[in-house]
Amino acid sequence: MLTCREFADFLMAYLDEELEDVQRDEFEQHIELCPPCVHYLATYAETVRLGKQCCVSDDGPPPADAPETLVQAILAARRVR
Amino acid sequence: MHDSDERALLRLLQAGDDAAYEEFVRAQTPRMLSVARRFLRNEEDARDAVQDAFVSAFRAIGNFEGGSRIATWLHRIVVNASLMKLRSKRRKPEESIEELLPRWQEDGHAARPAAPWAAEKLVEQDELRKLVQAGIERLPESHREVLLLRDIEELDTQEAAEMLGISTNAVKTRLHRARQALREVIDPALREGT
């Protein structure tokens, strides 16, 4: 029987489907018996989703705030190379 | 962009067409600047990284064979330029991630068992965004960059390993620890009943 600590250690491998069959069975047995680890699994997955959501805006095109000075600097850098 | 348009754009860029180059720079700079800003805290550094990336890209465009979208290829170059800039700024040894990881009792049970997160807290966009971004900022640099590469910029493990010059196993270990640490950092604000 896995401990909660071992469950947490193997969590990413489980989500990435990289565990051997025997390990995966042990992992899933632990899930059935341990509500805190069910919450840990759910909030770990939610953390990954939130990271993406909060760093990359999905609600439309990227902000059209490219500073003209930067665009001109890039164009100038090409001319002098 | 359709494949035929993409191929036409690539031909123009490889031929040194000034108008195509300017259009491409104007179209791609906003998104590429957003990418560089995620890695670099300083606006000037982010702009320098984007400029360096465009210069590198156009030195290499003749050898680009179109194995991926041009924007995807440029994105990888911007990420690499941002990492290089980050390295050049790194001064002091980083703190250990251990302080941010979950704590365990001797019998393997969590010192603080996990609880569900409150659904209503997950929809408060502005606060949530600040919370998660601040959490990512608290990660040691070697773990923050892996989390950004894998979970935010969506590079695969092999690409991230090559870009950082570390093994794929090291990428996996750092990513898992970075996610665990980020979860620990944001957990108190998101738990039900808090």
Image: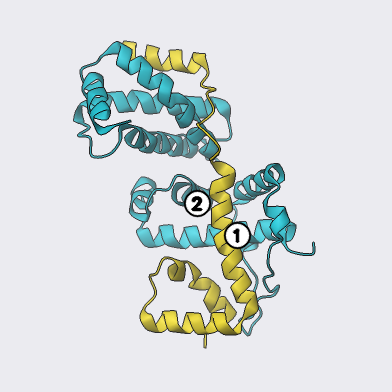
Chain colours: A yellow, B cyan
Name the quadrant containing residue B171.
Answer: bottom left
Please give the name of the residue rendered at 42% of the width and 81% of the height, measured from the top-left corner: A23
Report whether B13 appears left or right of B92.
left
**Secondary-structure class at tag 2:** helix
Query: Gap between marks 2 and 1, in whole Å?
Result: 11 Å
Front residue (pair A60, B61): A60
Report whether B50 appears left or right of B180.
left
Front residue (pair A57, B108): A57
Type of amino acid at the residue the image marks with label 2? Leu
x, y percentage for residue B56? 32, 27
Q: Is residue B43 above or below residue A4?
A: above
Residue that carries the numbered disc 2 in the rendered image: B147
Name the quadrant containing residue A36.
Answer: bottom right
x, y percentage for residue B75? 39, 35
Q: Is residue B160 above or below residue A32?
A: above
**Chain under label 2?**
B
Q: Is residue B9 above or below residue B18?
A: below
Residue at the bottom extreme of this rendering: A1
**Chain under label 1?**
B
Q: Give yes or no for contact between labels 2 and 1 (Cβ–Cβ under 8 Å).
A: no
Alpha-carbon neighbours of circle 2 within 10 Å: few (<14), some, or many (≥20)?
many
Q: Quadrant of the N terminus of chain B?
A: top left
x, y percentage for residue B92? 57, 44
**Secondary-structure class at tag 1:** helix
Q: Is residue B93 visible?
A: no
Front residue (pair B163, A7): A7
| Marked residue nearer the N-terminal end (2 or 1) | 2
x, y percentage for residue B112? 71, 72
Please give the name of the residue rendered at 39% of the width and 38% of the height, measured from the top-left corner: B80
Q: Which mark is residue B181?
A: 1
